Amino acid sequence: MVRKYDPESIPSVYNLSDAPVAKEGPGFEQVVFRGVDQMVGMTTIGPDREDKPQHTHPWEQTTIVIEGEVDFLVDGERVSLGVHDAVEIPPDVPHASRAVASEPARLLAFWPLREDRLDATDYQAEFDI
């Protein structure tokens, strides 16, 4: 796992509105920010995003809604979340999300450091060693 960082670049401060898009599609956009042992994804889900099948990953995920409303399907159970609601998804549990209103929703997803998402944080100079 890549844990080395340049101490001269700390504190590392980035505005996620300016971060490069890591994943995108119709009605979906995500940027990723990392720390030494953790990551956060800021995701915008629009009402035009098509429903996606549930997916799993071997990482725990905690998601907090910061704007709008979202339906989450977690292990077959649908839960509706509004601003400041949080949901915990254990490793390997199937889940999916979608916006429920005509306005986009914005979420913050927190994960441990994920090797499969490191390339999305190449913009962070403190880890370029």
Image (spheres, helix red, strand yellow):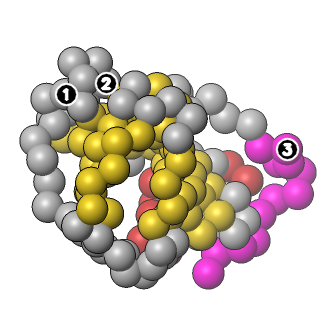
Task: Give above or below for 4 relative to 63.
Answer: below
**Label 1, residues with CA under 10 Å away: few <14, some 14-19, many ≥20:** some
Residue 100 shown left or right of residue 22 in the figure: left
Which image quadrant: the C terminus? bottom right
Say if mark 1 contacts mark 2, CB within 8 Å. yes
Pointer 1 residue: 47
Tell me the residue at 34%/42% (across/down).
Answer: 80
For the residue marked with disc 1, what is the amino acid? Pro
Pointer 3 residue: 11
Per the picture, the main secondary structure of the magenta-coloured stretch is loop
Q: Nearer the viewer, mark 1 or mark 3?
A: 1
Q: Secondary structure at mark 3?
A: loop
For the residue marked with disc 3, what is the amino acid? Pro
Disc 1/disc 3 C-alpha distance (Å):
36 Å
Disc 3/disc 2 C-alpha distance (Å):
31 Å
Q: Secondary structure at mark 1?
A: loop
Q: Can residue 7 be found in the magenta stretch?
A: yes
Dot placed on the residue nearer the N-terminal end, 3 or 2: 3
Residue 13 shown left or right of residue 117 in the figure: right
